Amino acid sequence: TPDLKGRIDVLFISLNGSTAEEYCAVTHPRDGEAAWQAMLDFTRRAAGYVPTVVMTIVNKDKSPAEIAACRTLAEGLGAGPQGVAGSVGNILPDAQRGPQP
């Protein structure tokens, strides 16, 4: 991930849930739960080189508690103050959303 430094300003990473089980249910990764851990490790490393890291979830069927758990996880990995962006509907406060298409 040092290769990312100075090359990109924002990195979006699909979190998709607060647990390995949820992540695997959504993404069906070839490597199973090892893919979850690899994604978490990549996020942690990337946050040291990319100014803004945003983790996304599909929040269509997520409870407020699950969204909060995702936000806590993302922030713990070094995702910026925006933490988690929902890819179905936006869970960020209006002040943090920026321009909308």
Image: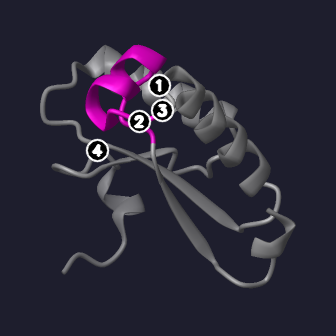
The magenta region covers 15-30
Mark linked to residue 29: 2
Gap in Å between the C-alphas at discs 2 and 1? 5 Å
Gap in Å between the C-alphas at discs 1 and 3? 23 Å
Circles 2 and 4: CB atoms closer than 8 Å: no
Q: Which residue sits at x=65%, y=80%?
A: 8
Gap in Å between the C-alphas at discs 4 and 1? 28 Å
Q: Secondary structure at mark 2?
A: loop
Mark linked to residue 32: 1
Say if residue 7 shows up in the picture: yes
Type of the residue with mark 2:
Pro
Circles 2 and 3: CB atoms closer than 8 Å: no
Type of the residue with mark 3:
Arg
Type of the residue with mark 1:
Gly
If you read the primary sequence from the N terminus, does the residue marked by circle 1 or circle 3 appear first? 1
Circles 2 and 1: CB atoms closer than 8 Å: yes
Say if residue 47 shows up in the picture: no
If you read the primary sequence from the N terminus, does the residue marked by circle 2 or circle 4 appear first? 2
The residue tagged 3 is 71
Q: Is residue 26 left or right of residue 96?
A: left
Gap in Å between the C-alphas at discs 2 and 3? 22 Å
Q: Is residue 99 left or right of residue 13?
A: left
Q: Which residue sits at x=39%, y=28%?
A: 23
| Number of residues whose C-alpha sits closer than 10 Å to that of mark 3, classed few (under 14), some (14–19) or many (20 or more) | many
Circles 3 and 4: CB atoms closer than 8 Å: yes
Query: Considering the image in quadrants, where does the C terminus appear?
Result: bottom left
| Number of residues whose C-alpha sits closer than 10 Å to that of mark 2, classed few (under 14), some (14–19) or many (20 or more) | few
Q: Quadrant of residue 44?
A: top right
Residue 90 in the image: above or below residue 97: above
| Number of residues whose C-alpha sits closer than 10 Å to that of mark 1, classed few (under 14), some (14–19) or many (20 or more) | some
Mark linked to residue 91: 4
